[in-house]
Image (spheres, rainbow, N blue to C red):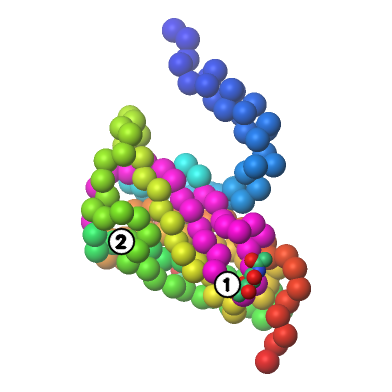
């Protein structure tokens, strides 16, 4: 039997190559733990604007598929620059309902679950944008347990603000 997935995947690859310039804000991401199962499936991670503004106001957009996400879940953004001259770890927590429509409602149905999109506004604070290369660990947690977790790099270009 022919594998039903191979051709669409190939087409998708072609399409993404053609549209690469439009997808500049897209981030390559990996699951936090390759062997752990996360019930929330992440399809795309994007940051806006790209490159982000050092004064902040950057946003993270995530799309994917999921089952029901409890309203008390929290979104945790961990920005770190471990290899910076001044290493830091900065953790911010947002209520899930600040990042997506609550309760998480059915979108177009797919075998992967319900399509969702998440938008984290003011995802970064100026302190976190001092380093050129940052590691962002983005997770959704239900009582300390991650139901989604991805890691991606964040590059910050442009002039650094005056240090005070
Ligand atoms: C990754 O997930 C596996 C399976 O859940 C677990 O056994 C392992 O301890 C995890 N690794 C880390 C570094 O958390
Ligand atoms: C960066 O943010 C500052 C303060 O919010 C704003 O004045 C400036 O126009 C922004 N720059 C860009 C390129 O968006
Ligand atoms: C934040 O991310 C850094 C780098 O990945 C990691 O070392 C640290 O343990 C994380 N902190 C929390 C509270 O998740």
Q: Secondary structure at mark 1?
A: loop
Q: Give whichever of 132, 2 is nearer the camera.
A: 132
Picture residue at 70% right of the left edge, 80% below the top: 161
- Residue 41 showing in the rendered view: no
Picture residue at 46% right of the left edge, 73% below the top: 91
Name the residue that disc number 2 marks: 97
| Residue 25 in the image: above or below residue 132 | above
Picture residue at 34% right of the left edge, 31% below the top: 110
| Residue 152 in the image: above or below residue 93 | above
* Image spot of residue 159 (x, y percent): 76, 73
* Residue stretch in magenta: 45-70
* Image spot of residue 14 (x, y percent): 64, 26
* Location of the C terminus (image quadrant): bottom right
Name the residue that disc number 1 marks: 56
Earlier-in-chain disc, 1 versus 2: 1
* Image spot of residue 53 (x, y percent): 64, 68
Label 1 residue near ligand 2, CB within 8 Å? yes
Real-space Cα separation, disc 1 to disc 2, in angstroms: 21 Å
């Amino acid at each position: 039997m022919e594998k039903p997935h191979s051709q669409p995947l190939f087409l998708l690859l072609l399409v993404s190559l053609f549209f690469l310039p439009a997808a500049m804000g897209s981030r390559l991401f990996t699951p936090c733990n390759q062997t752990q199962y996360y019930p929330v499936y992440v399809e795309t991670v994007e940051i806006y604007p790209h490159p982000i503004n050092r004064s902040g106001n950057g946003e993270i957009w995530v799309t994917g598929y999921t089952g029901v996400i409890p309203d008390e879940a929290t979104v945790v953004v961990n920005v770190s620059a471990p290899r910076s001259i001044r290493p830091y770890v900065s953790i911010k927590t947002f209520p899930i309902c600040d990042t997506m429509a609550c309760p998480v409602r059915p979108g177009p149905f797919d075998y992967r679950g319900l399509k969702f999109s998440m938008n984290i506004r003011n995802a970064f604070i100026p302190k976190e944008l001092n380093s050129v290369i940052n590691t962002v660990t983005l997770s959704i947690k239900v009582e300390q347990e991650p139901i989604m977790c991805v890691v991606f790099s964040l590059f910050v270009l442009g002039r650094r603000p005056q240090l005070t």
